[in-house]
Every structure is written in structure tokens, then in C-alpha cells.
Amino acid sequence: MTDQFQHPDYYLLDELLSDEHKMIRDATREWVKRSVSPIIEDFAQRAAFPQHLVKEMGEVGLFGPYVPEEYGGAGLDHISYGLMMQEVERGDSGIRSTCSVQSSLVMFPIYAYGSEEQKQKFLPKLATGEYLGSFGLTEPNFGSNPGGMTTNFVEDGDDIILNGAKMWISNSPFCDIAVVWAKNEAGRIKGVIVERGMEGFTTPETHNKWSLRASATGELVFDNVRVPKTNILPGRDGLGAPLSCLDSARFGIAWGALGAAMDCYDTALRYSKERIQFGKPIAAFQLQQKKLAEMITEITKAQLLTWRLGHLKNEGRATSAQISMAKRNNVEIALKIAREARQMLGGMGITGDFSIMRHMMNLESVVTYEGTHDIHLLITGLDITGENAFV
């Protein structure tokens, strides 16, 4: 079907955006309508990753847009990045995941903690999509508790020998490099850039997913992989290093999930005006109006949340807990809106003729990755009470 999306703006929030923000958002939206919407249902049904979009995403500036121009980025602010992720996830959560991993989990740590040599070597190729990256933190036995990781390395001359495994890794089957977090012999967590082709490094794909079906998911397996010490990120170590990357990704997800919610609302609103039952559009019935009114209310609140968070991030004042709250809230309201919208479309809501069921299945992954719903509640709880409920 033709992509007829029109974004809801009940509180005239466009007036709070700069002309540059609106231009960037609209350009991303046009790319989604042109390159993602016409193909995404087919790829999702086939559980295939539209790999040809990677180069396009590089061409339209979706990779590392806040990275300075000298390293291949566009030097944009964080609101611009958020608006881009909003539009991309409006198209599909899996495609936004590719952008988030590349930008926030691969380019960000190399830019923030990498050596000048590492920045020059990897960032420009990641920005154009010549290289696709992945991020290795989650392990088979360590998800919400990443500090318990067992992936490790030992020094051997000018190299390290890396062993272990990571799972649930977006982009892994096709990645050219992976930013991997592992413990050294002293038990200190370090970031290591592992490159495709290094002996003992494999990336088996994860199959049989009901969610993020148009995204490539897999494992990162390290069997005595020899990596030069020059590939260790020198700027920061400890668990705080990968968690800072998650902050950047969660920020993008807060905007992205809002995009999925907006798409579901827009689809349900349009359908309700066209679908006739009992001699009138279903939009004329009270219960359908209740659903739509609650959707636009939650979307408006989430728009205000992300806009304010974007300003705080631009000023360097956004806390991890604030980002956590926005991620949890916006994914939760997106899931609820997707489910209500699906009901409004009746049987048509489960078909690939509309985007809603795909969004709903995708969001079941988004509510889990980058910190589960429950973990984010505990992050807020710790922040407001000072009491740690994790242990």
C-alpha cells in the first residue's frame, strides 16, 4: 500500500523545532516513504534483512549524524538524531535498530573512547555504510547483569587472545567490525574492536524470530581470536563505558518507539474514517473515539518528553535515569497504542496490508532490549529513593 503517513502534532510542537530540525526530519521521512515502506512488509514476511539499505542509510546521513564532519559524520545535534530515529522506526523498528547500533553502539564508543588512529580508520567507513558494525555486550547467561560477563582476553606480546560469546546481537551476521566488551586478566572490562576475517571469529545468525524479522540478529563467537592491542579502546574502561553507549542508544529508542506509535495511530485514524459499519464510519462510535483520544494524548506527552530530553542532551545535562525513563515510557505507550490500533482494524489488523501487527511484534523486542521494562523502572526507583533494588 502507498505510504500515506501524516505525523500527529496536537500541541503544535513543530513550532519548537528549528527549520534545520524540520528539514532533517522531513528528508528522513521522504527516504522512509521512498525506500523502506514499499519493501518492508515483504522483507519482514520473509525474515530477510534488506542489506541494500545500508549504503542508502549512509548516503542520507543516518549513521553517526552527531559525529563531527572530520570523521565522516554531519556534526548535528541530538534532537536531529532523535528525529531521524523517530522517522526510521516509523518505517520499521528493525531498520532503526541497524541505525542505532551503527551510530550509538559502534561509532559513539570509537569516537568517544577510541584513539585518533582508530577514529580515522573506522569512523568514515562506518558513516558511509561501507562498514557495518555490531556491539557485543549481552551474553547467553548475562543480559540485565552485564557486569557478570565471562568473555575475556589475555595478553600475548603485541596482541590479545579473545575467548567467549555474545548473543542477541543486531547486525552480527553481516558486520564488518564488532565493538566487543570483555574482561582482561585483572577482571577489568575493556572495549575491543574485532574485525571480520580474524581467525576464530564467527557470527552465526539467529533464526525463528517472530519480532524484528527484517533485522539481522546473531551471535559473536570468539575462539582464541588474536586481536592487536592497537584495537583496544584506550579512552575508557569499566562497566561505565558500555553503559554510556547504552545511554546514547536508549535516547534514540525513546524517539524511535514514538515513531512506531505515531504510525499505528495514523493508520488507525485513517482506517476509522473509511471503515463503515452500521451505516456510519467507525470513527463515529464512542469506544473508537476513546481509543483514538487516548492514543493522541499519550503520543503528545511522549513528544514533549523526547523534546525536553533532546535539549538536556544537547546541553550535556541529560542523566542516565532521565534517558531510562523516556525509553521505558515511550516503548510502553507505543506497545499499548499498537495493540489498540490492531483491534480497531479488526481482522485487517493482523495482515501485512497494514503496518500495525509488524510494529506490535517488533516492539516486543524493543521493550526488552537496551534494558527491560522492569530494569528501567528500577533505575528510576534507585534514582528517586537512593535505594538499590537490583541486588
Image (spheres, grey):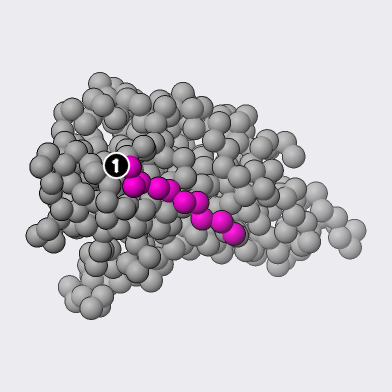
- Residue 24, position in %: x, y? 45, 28
Q: Nearer the viewer, residue 133 or 368?
A: 133
Circle 1 sits on which residue? 194
Using the rendered view, name the quadrant where residue 140 is placed. bottom left
Question: As drawn, which residue projects farthest toward the right?
Answer: 279
Question: As drawn, which residue projects farthest toward the top?
Answer: 70
Q: Nearer the viewer, residue 76 or 101?
A: 101
Numbered circles on residues, count: 1
- Residue 211, position in %: x, y? 57, 57
Which residues, given as a range, are shown in magenta? Answer: 199-208
Residue drawn at x 29%, y 30% is: 122
Using the rendered view, name the quadrant where residue 30 is placed. top right
Q: Is residue 21 left or right of residue 319?
A: right
- Residue 363, position in %: x, y? 53, 58
Residue drawn at x 63%, y 53% is: 358
- Residue 82, position in %: x, y? 40, 41
In the rendered structure, which amino acid carries the disc numbered 1?
Val
Q: Residues within 10 Å of mark 1 (few under 14, many from 20)?
A: many
